Amino acid sequence: MAHRPDLSFRFTHAITRTPADSVADGIRAVDTGNPSGEKFRAEHERYVSALQEAGLTVDVLPQLETYPDSCFVEDPAFCLPEGAIQLRPGTASREGEGAEIRAALESRFGKVVDLPGNGHVDGGDVLMLDDVILIGLSARTDREGADAFAGLLGEWGYKAEVCETPDGVLHFKTACSTLGDGVILATKVMADSGFFGDREIVVVPEGEDYAANVIRVNDVVMVPEGYPKTLAAIEAAGFTTVVLPTHEARKVDGGLSCLSLRFALN
C-alpha cells in the first residue's frame, strides 16, 4: 500500500446514530452505573455539532431501541474512499446491527460488501493509518475474521497487519489513536508494543488511559472531557483540540471513535 497522505483523518462525511434509551442495557466490562439516554443524546448532539464544525456532512440515523449498543456505529462497518465493508461484531447482542446500518452505507457508497467467511471483526479494533491498516485481535475480533478482513483490504489495494492486542485492552483503539501526520497517541503498554514502528508516539499520562481514544477530524483532534494531562500533551505536540463530553458513553465502554463512521467521498 502506497502512503496516502491524510487518509486517516481527512474526511468529508460521517454516519452516526442517536443513542436509544435502551443504552442502559448496553454491554460493558465493568459496571459503573447505567447511562441515561437523555443525557447521552445531549452529549451526542454536541458530538455531531463538532463533526459538522470540522467540515463534515453528518448523517444522523434514528435511535434503535432493539439494539442497546447501536449508537456505536463504528463497530459494524468500515469505510474507505472506494466503498464500505459491513463487518460482523463479535458480541451476539450486536449481530443485527449490520443489517440496520446497511441502507445508510448504500446511500453513500456505490460499493458495499460483507466481511467474508464466518469470523468476527469489531471496527473498534481497526486503526487506519496513512500507510497501513492495523487490525487488533481481541475478545470481539477473532483470527478468522481479522485474516479475512486483511485479505479483503489487500484486494482493495491496502496493506493490513494483524496485531495481538495486549491483555486487558477491550478494543485495539481503546488504547491508541492516530493524531495524523505520522503521530500516534497511545497508552504506555501500546507505546511499548512495537506496533507503530518508528512513528512518533505521544504517550498518555498515567491515570488517563481512557483518553487514548481520540479522533483527528480534518484540522482538529477531538478529546474526551476530563483528561487535562492528555489534552496538554496533544496540544504540546502541535495539534488543535476540541474537548467533548463522553461521560455517558464511557459507562458502556464507548469512546469518541465508536460514535461515528468517518470517511472521504470524492
Image: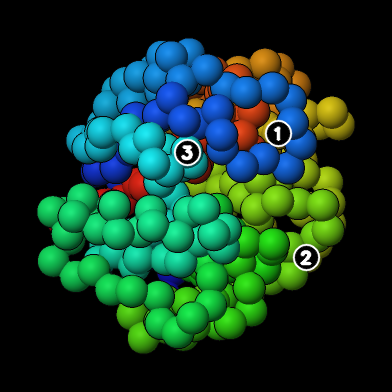
Q: Is residue 141 above or below residue 17?
A: below
Q: Which residue is mark 1?
A: 210
Q: Is residue 191 left or right of residue 25?
A: right
**Position of the N terminus by quadrant:** bottom left
Residue pointed to by mark 2: 194
Rendered view: 187 above or below 152: above
Of residues 143 and 214, the one drawn nearer to the viewer in this rendering: 143
List x then y, in percent, for residue 71: 42, 38
Measured from the top left, where is residue 9 in percent x and y?
A: 41, 47
Point out which mark residue 174 bears. none
Label 1 and label 3: CA atoms lie apart by 21 Å
**Are the two marked residues, 2 and 3, in contact with CB atoms closer than 8 angstroms?**
no
Marks 2 and 1, the one that precedes in the sequence = 2
Picture residue at 45% right of the left edge, 60% below the top: 95
Q: Earlier in the sequence, mark 1 or mark 3?
A: 3
Q: According to the image, label 3 marks what residue? A: 68
Query: On the image, which quarter does residue 102 sit in?
Result: bottom left
Q: Give x and y (percent) for residue 6.
A: 39, 53
Q: Secondary structure at mark 3?
A: loop
**Is residue 101 visible to us here?**
yes
Q: Position of residue 45 (x, y in %)?
A: 35, 19
